[in-house]
Image (spheres, rainbow, N blue to C red):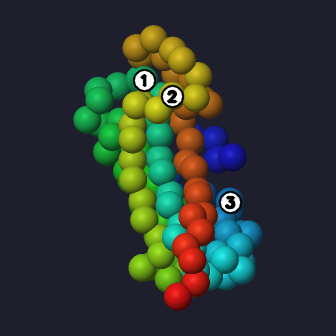
């Protein structure tokens, strides 16, 4: 898990420290897609949270690509505070809602 402060971007260096095993995992499942999604807590405006979560997800996706995962396999999307892990009210800084999720999605071999 990468600890994220409310409203902060994710630096490429911080992402790289947490992605060590993912390129080899993606190589094993070489006919799969990799979906990176970002989320925020409810602090701040909706549009800003969407932008922050998209930026975080893209940073992780770019890190996977720079580590050798084919860019055609990697997608990223930010959802802001629309998919909370912990239900909170508005303007609640809940660290477990600030997260990046990576999913490997199997595709049949061609």
Residue 40 coordinates in the image, percent (x, y):
46, 35
Would you say residue 63 is visible in this rendering? no
Q: In this view, does 18 lie to the left or right of 89?
A: right
Residue 89 coordinates in the image, percent (x, y):
45, 11
Mark 2 element type: loop
Q: Are marks 1 and 2 in contact (CB under 8 Å)?
A: yes
- What residue is at 41 percent from the left and 23 percent from the top? 43
Crowding at dot 3, Cα within 10 Å, few <14 / some 14-19 / many 20+, comes out as few
83 is higher (above) or lower (below) than 29: above
19 is higher (above) or lower (below) than 52: below
Q: Earlier in the sequence, mark 3 or mark 1?
A: 3
Residue 97 coordinates in the image, percent (x, y):
55, 31
Q: Residue 84 carries which label?
A: 2
Mark 1 element type: loop
Mark 3 element type: helix
* Cα–Cα gap, marks 1 and 2: 9 Å
Q: Quadrant of residue 105?
A: bottom right
- What residue is at 42 percent from the left and 16 percent from the top? 91
Q: Which mark is residue 42?
A: 1
């Amino acid at each position: 898990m990468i600890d994220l402060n409310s409203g902060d971007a994710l630096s490429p260096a911080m992402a790289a420290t947490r992605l060590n095993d993912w390129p080899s995992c993606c190589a094993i499942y070489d006919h799969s897609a990799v979906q990176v999604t970002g989320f925020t807590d409810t602090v701040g405006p909706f549009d800003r949270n969407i932008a922050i979560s998209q930026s975080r997800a893209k940073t992780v996706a770019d890190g996977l690509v720079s580590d050798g995962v084919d860019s055609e396999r990697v997608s990223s999307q930010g959802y802001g505070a629309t998919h909370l892990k912990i239900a909170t009210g508005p303007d609640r800084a809940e660290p477990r809602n600030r997260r990046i999720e990576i999913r490997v999605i199997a595709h049949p071999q061609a």
